[in-house]
């Protein structure tokens, strides 16, 4: 039986595995609540159902009004109180729909062997099988929270989406700054959400995030990210033009090694530079 977790009027689809809940950025579900411990509770989803365990939190875990001790099996409809945040476990949707959703998730974050970055020979782009455990957790976090953030953005709740995604996005950029290997699909997912946040919040820092991320990767942004950045650049007034120009210069140096598709992406990124210069 499949399950989903309702939080902030949105449903988080639960796949098999373990999901930590707490204030720490390493948790798959990060709750911005002073009553929540850094690592507060652990949800385990398996073939037999869902269990929750209190990780020796300061304020405990409340299930259906009762404070739990140790690991407790959950049933559909159970209400979970962690700090001041209420979550509800619900039965999953029909199997056909869930199977389709799972397939989409696999296409979004495929597990592929590490491959050399053609634009930077000798440098490997990490796969989800290989790299940092924290990056695997961030991929899980994006899978878990991404659909919720998308719904929040669609409903005009940009602040809610920003709060949901901020810790996962921070982990990705910090890992990039530290020179850690990042899976290309994870980079693209983080960039897409950052560009959407730039468009929705009109905060130039999210657009700068995208530029910094791909400058570190040494490759052009993919077309969907560029499309979103064009929308964002027309709304924000504080683009870091120096950073953007440095990125364009880096790509220009690599231009002889680019194929036709990457050359076209480069031309569109040059257009972003011109647009930013006019702001």
Image: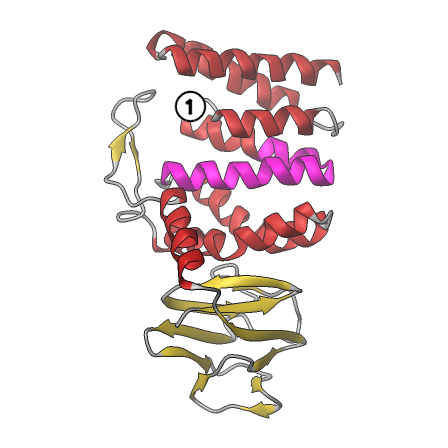
**Which of these two is toward me, 162 or 14?**
14
- Please say whether residue 116 is one of the residues in the magenta stretch: no
| Prevalent SS, magenta region | helix
Report x, y in % for residue 163: 65, 54
Name which quarter of the figure residue 275 lies in: top right
Quadrant of the snapshot with the N terminus: bottom left
Q: Residue at x 44, y 30 (%)?
A: 216
Q: Is residue 157 above or below residue 220?
A: below
Whether residue 27 is visible to the viewer of this picture, yes or no, is no
- Please say whether residue 187 is one of the residues in the magenta stretch: yes
Q: Residue at x 73, y 24 (%)?
A: 234
Magenta span: 183-209
**Which of these two is toward me, 106 or 259?**
106
Q: Which residue is label 1 attached to?
A: 219
Name which quarter of the figure residue 23 lies in: bottom right
Name which quarter of the figure residue 19 lies in: bottom left
Whether residue 150 is visible to the viewer of this picture, yes or no, is yes
Q: Is residue 163 left or right of residue 92?
A: right
């Amino acid at each position: 039986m499949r399950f989903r977790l309702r939080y902030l009027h949105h449903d988080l689809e639960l796949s098999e595995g373990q999901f930590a809940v707490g204030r720490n950025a390493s948790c798959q579900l990060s709750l911005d609540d002073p009553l929540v411990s850094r690592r507060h509770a652990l949800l385990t989803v398996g073939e037999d159902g869902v269990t929750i365990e209190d990780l020796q939190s300061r304020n405990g875990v409340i299930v259906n009004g009762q404070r739990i001790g140790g690991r407790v099996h959950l049933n559909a409809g159970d209400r979970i109180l962690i700090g001041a945040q209420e979550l509800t476990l619900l039965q999953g949707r029909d199997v056909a729909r869930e199977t389709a959703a799972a397939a989409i998730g696999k296409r979004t974050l495929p597990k592929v062997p590490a491959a050399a970055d053609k634009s930077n020979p000798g440098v490997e782009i990490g796969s989800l099988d290989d790299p940092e455990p924290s990056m695997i957790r961030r991929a899980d976090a994006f899978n878990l929270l991404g659909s919720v953030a998308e719904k929040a953005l669609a409903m005009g709740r940009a602040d809610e989406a920003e709060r949901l995604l901020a810790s996962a996005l921070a982990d990705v950029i910090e890992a990039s700054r530290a020179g850690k290997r990042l899976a290309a699909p994870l980079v693209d997912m983080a960039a897409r959400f950052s560009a959407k946040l730039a468009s929705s919040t009109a905060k130039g820092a999210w657009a700068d995030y995208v530029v910094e991320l791909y400058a570190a990767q040494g490759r052009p942004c993919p077309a969907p990210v560029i499309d979103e950045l064009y929308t964002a650049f027309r709304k924000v007034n504080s683009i870091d033009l120096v950073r953007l120009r440095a990125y364009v210069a880096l790509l220009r140096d690599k231009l002889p090694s680019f194929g036709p598709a990457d050359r076209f992406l480069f031309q569109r990124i040059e257009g972003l530079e011109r647009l930013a210069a006019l702001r």
